[in-house]
Amino acid sequence: MKLIKIISHPATLIICFLLVLISGQHLGGFYLLYILLGLPHGAVHSILGVMGVGILLFSHYKYKRAFIYMIEPLLNIAGVILLGLSLFLFFYNDRSQYNYSTFYETLPQISMVLFAFLIASFLVINLIKLRQVAT
């Protein structure tokens, strides 16, 4: 039961999101670096990532994971969708294919698979909670 609480905690998801490894042709790093570099330029992936993290943190600190109101799981689901969309648009809008080596290296792939697993488990837990609150 403790493992499920750790996996479904918003902080775990946010940390994993920010620490996804991105490998470029000459320079790589954590996704946090690319979010921070894109914010001054108004990059869509950066804005969506910050909004997703903000929504998850707001939901966590406002409702304390009590799942009494229907809005809490809805905010969690919206935040997760924004995080996933941020990462998707980061690679989709990469016209020069500078960061595509992320998909050919093992460690970045492991970090992306771990993030995908956390997204899936977080969504399932919140959909279950949404169903419980709705009935």
Image (cartoon, rainbow, N blue to C red):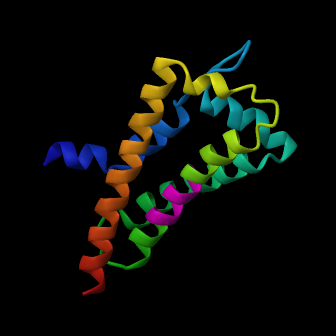
Image height check: is 126 above or below 105? below
51 or 58: nearer the eye?
A: 51
Residue at the outermost top position: 26
Q: Residue at x 41, y 70 (%)?
A: 72
Q: Image check: 104 left or right of 37?
A: left
Q: What segment is highlighted magenta in the picture? A: 76-83
User: How far across and down, in percent of the image, does residue 122 sit?
Assistant: 35, 54
Image height check: is 131 above or below 84? below
User: How far across and down, in percent of the image, does residue 91 sit?
Assistant: 68, 39
Q: Residue at x 37, y 52 (%)?
A: 120
User: How far across and down, in percent of the image, does residue 52 sit?
Assistant: 58, 55
Q: Split into 4 quadrants, where in the image is the C terminus? A: bottom left
Q: Specify whether residue 22 is in view.
A: no
Q: Main secondary structure of the magenta part?
A: helix
91 or 115: nearer the eye?
A: 91
Q: Image check: 36 left or right of 127?
A: right
Q: Is residue 114 magenta?
A: no
Q: Specify whether residue 42 is in view.
A: yes
Residue at the outermost right position: 41
Q: Image check: 54 left or right of 125?
A: right
Q: Residue at x 13, y 49 (%)?
A: 1
Q: Residue at x 42, y 27 (%)?
A: 110
Residue 117 quadrant: top left
